Image (spheres, rainbow, N blue to C red):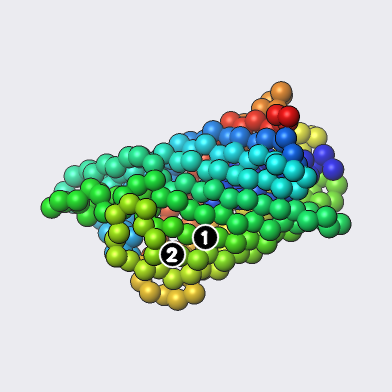
Amino acid sequence: MRVIRLALPLASALLASSAAAGPWSKSGGELYVKLSEGAFIAGEYVAPSGETEDDVDYLGLTTALYAEVGLAKGVQVQLYLPHVVARNAYTASGDRYLTFGGGDARVGAQYSPPLPFPAAVRLDVKVPLYDVTEPGGLEGDLFPARGDGQVDVDGWLSAGGSAGDLFGFGELGWRHRTAAYPGGDAGLDFADSALAYGQLGYKLGGWFIVALNAQAVVPVEDDGRTKGYATAGPSVYAPVGGGLAVEGYADATLWAQAASRGYSVILGVSYAGEVW
């Protein structure tokens, strides 16, 4: 079972961008928290409206705090708080436009029922911490947005298992794109999407974990603005003692619809332990 307990913080690290945890839910008093820095690099920029700018080098830097707290046996809550610095560099003119501030926060809850294998149901909500209509003005559309600006509600089913030092899990979900804008209303409606995530990992030397991860977001209709994408890439989880670990993740966009194609790299430091 030790590999499963190591798989839990690793899954948390890899899925922090979507505030997910895999099927291994925390029990009462257990804590996992991670501070990370991530970069997304693309040779294009896609606005919330779906309009694509091909003559733009896009860079997004995200500093994020992610936490899971167990409330009772198999019941946990989770929180993802990002700060985003985004830059559009226009290759033809040489102009650069920068935005920074809160990104898409996520809050969620998860429950693992008493089954003979790791499984969970999860609900999480995306809450934008920005006004998608800002900045305004004559050149407002040249600045990169920090997200679509409206609330999403995701539901997930997750199941996994292990055999020796090998472990894996898979998740299927559904994303409901609401028309609720906490900031300015951009007047855009988005289609719902089917969600999938998978991870296959292996423990090396009794402590170091490597994994391969893949995810997909597939809109139910092609309306020209609802983002869809598929990514895949490797990750590592390296405990350093005292509940602390160093984590790394990278991926590449394999397919995109109304979304930028690029590469992501995330580095983080995490702590896993009991707080009561």
* Residue type for callout 1: Val
Q: Is residue 224 visible?
A: yes
Using the image, determine if residue 149 lies above or below residue 38.
below
Q: In front here: 117 or 79? A: 79
Which residue shows up at 83% across the image and 57% down it? 115
The quarter of the rendered structure image containing the N terminus is: top right
| Alpha carbons under labels 1 and 2: distance apart | 8 Å
Q: Earlier in the sequence, mark 1 or mark 2?
A: 1
Q: In front here: 111 or 82? A: 111
Pointer 1 with pointer 2, Cβ within 8 A: yes
Which residue shows up at 55% across the image and 43% down it? 79
The image quadrant of residue 3 is top right
Q: Is residue 168 visible?
A: no
Residue 115 as seen in the image, left or right of residue 238: right
Q: Secondary structure at mark 2?
A: loop
Q: Which mark is residue 203?
A: none
Where residue 257 sits: x, y (%)?
42, 67
Residue 96 as seen in the image, left or right of residue 20: left
Q: Which residue is mark 2?
A: 178
Using the image, determine if residue 68 lies above or below residue 53.
above
Which residue shows up at 63% across the image and 61% down it? 156
The image quadrant of residue 197 is bottom right
Residue 159 as seen in the image, left or right of residue 116: left
* Residue type for callout 2: Thr
